[in-house]
Image (spheres, rainbow, N blue to C red):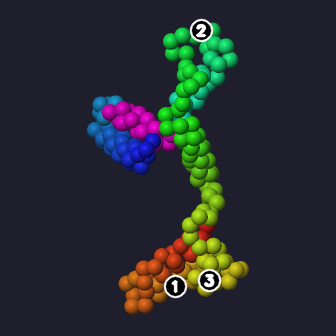
Amino acid sequence: MKNQRLVLALAAVFAGMTVLMVVLAAAFRDPVPLFVAALFGAATYFFWYHATGRIASGIYERVERQARTNANGGSPGGRGGFGAGPREDWEAPGGDDRWERVRQQARQQRRRARADAQGRRRAPSTTSGPSRSQARQVLGVSADADQATVKKAYRERVKEAHPDTETGSEEEFKRVNKAYERLSE
């Protein structure tokens, strides 16, 4: 999961190829591109499944479950032996905390996806950008300003702050954009 963006990009490419094959199959009325599209679709799914961390967390959880069962007196089938699971001194690759982070990231991604699918907005990020009061100061609007007023003030300020104008600068332009993003969350 080290190259998550790369794997997601590959998934997007394979998804595009899947769509192209389906269109070709429909255009030429030929079942061969549909077979190829099914293969590309399967590859897309597995790339996405890997990039979200579900494969790694699933494997780790199965190994942990098997180790707990073996520690309690044997495997689920009552047999020990070969493939019975890790020994007590076994450690997860990269340390236990790494896999916990993987599981937490996967849970967070699933929550975000569900929230986005339901049309809800995520909570504003508190780590970057100005606070709401600072954003209002940058745009020059009052605390009780509605969205239309904020948008109008943003458009005026962005015209002044744009780097291509005589009075504008890139830093001020970025400040205005971040302020608008914060107030439109």
Q: Mark 1 Cα within 10 Å, few/some/many (few <14, many 20+)? A: some
Q: Quadrant of residue 46?
A: top left
Mark 1 touching mark 3, by CB under 8 A?
A: no
Choose the circle earlier in sequence order: 1 or 3.
3
Q: Quadrant of residue 7?
A: top left
Q: Is residue 34 above or below residue 69?
A: below
Query: In which quadrant is the N terminus drawn?
Result: top left
> Quick check: is 47 in the magenta stretch?
yes
Q: Residue at x 62, y 78 (%)?
A: 134
Residue 137, numbered circle: 3
Q: Mark 3 Cα within 10 Å, few/some/many (few <14, many 20+)? A: some
Amino acid type of the residue that numbered disc 1 sits on in the rendered structure = Arg
Q: CA distance from mark 2 to mark 3?
A: 70 Å
**Which label sits in the foreground, 1 or 3?**
3
Q: CA distance from mark 1 to mark 3?
A: 11 Å
Q: Which residues are magenta?
A: 36-54
Which residue in the structure is indicated by mark 1? 157
Q: Secondary structure at mark 2?
A: loop
Q: Position of residue 167 (x, y in %)?
A: 43, 90
Which residue in the structure is indicated by mark 2? 79
Closer to the camera in the image, 65 or 107: 65
Amino acid type of the residue that numbered disc 2 sits on in the rendered structure = Arg
Q: Residue at x 32, y 33 (%)?
A: 36
Most common secondary structure along the magenta stretch = helix
Amino acid type of the residue that numbered disc 3 sits on in the rendered structure = Gln
Q: Position of residue 152 (x, y in %)?
A: 57, 82
